[in-house]
Image (cartoon, helix red, strand yellow):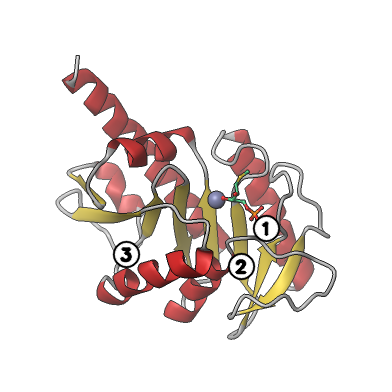
Amino acid sequence: MNRQQLAQEIIDAGRFLYGRGWSPATSSNYSVRLSESQALLTVSGKHKGQLGLDDVLATDFDGKSLEPGKKPSAETLLHTQLYRWKPEIGAVLHTHSVNATVLSRLTLADSLVFADYELQKAFSGISTHESQVLVPIFDNDQDIARLASKVQPWLDQHPDCVGYLIRGHGLYTWGPCMSDALRQVEAFEFLFECELKTLSIANR
Ligand SMILES: CSC[C@@H](O)[C@@H](O)C(=O)COP(=O)(O)O
Ligand SMILES: [Zn+2]
């Protein structure tokens, strides 16, 4: 795929995720791998339901903009660390849904476990509900380099990790291509909603 086609995938993802209410206003950021050392990412501060072809830029994996005049996403390092972590990752999505925000605030532990849901099979590498999907929750931090340095040891120790939450903030998930990453966002959102409904019924 050429750069314009990859940029269009990011634009289409933004329209879809905004439409589902998972990327409100200027929240969220999205990227695709351009090469073994570069990513194409959303610029900072744009409304993600209204992205245009000019609202993406190439960065290296240190998060440095390769397009002077464009401001990379504030969370660029959280994307580029994933491309460095696994060469098979081709797309990364960060979203800000109500359910991800509420569930990550309600959960006092530093991780969530999904078990016995059929929909777990939507995640890469999972073929049965008889599995556990462990999702770490990192405390939010405006210092993204510091946050990335907390995420990295988890990734290194959990090579099968399919996504993580930042408390009171949102979700990161990824896949070999954009459609895989989108499928995982959708699966996470289903599971977040199930967990919240279960909690609210249990606490009646
Ligand atoms: C609208 S506040 C959200 C931001 O602080 C941030 O968390 C975010 O997801 C978007 O930042 P951005 O710099 O546009 O990529
Ligand atoms: Zn964010």
> For the N terminus, which image quadrant?
bottom right
Mark 1 falls on what kind of element?
Answer: helix
Q: Residues within 10 Å of mark 2 (few under 14, many from 20)?
A: many
Amino acid on which disc 3 is placed: Cys
Gap in angstroms between the C-alphas marked 1 and 2: 9 Å
Q: Position of residue 107 (x, y in %)?
A: 27, 40
Circles 1, 2 touching at the beta carbon (< 8 Å)? yes
| Badge 3 or badge 1: first in the primary sequence | 1
- Judged left or right of residue 106, residue 78 is right
Circles 2, 3 touching at the beta carbon (< 8 Å)? no
Of circles 3 and 1, the one toward us is 3
Mark 3 falls on what kind of element?
Answer: loop
Q: Position of residue 131 (x, y in %)?
A: 17, 54
Q: Which residue is mark 2?
A: 32
- Judged left or right of residue 72, residue 84 is left
Mark 2 falls on what kind of element?
Answer: strand
Kindly tell me whether residue 86 is visible in this rendering: no
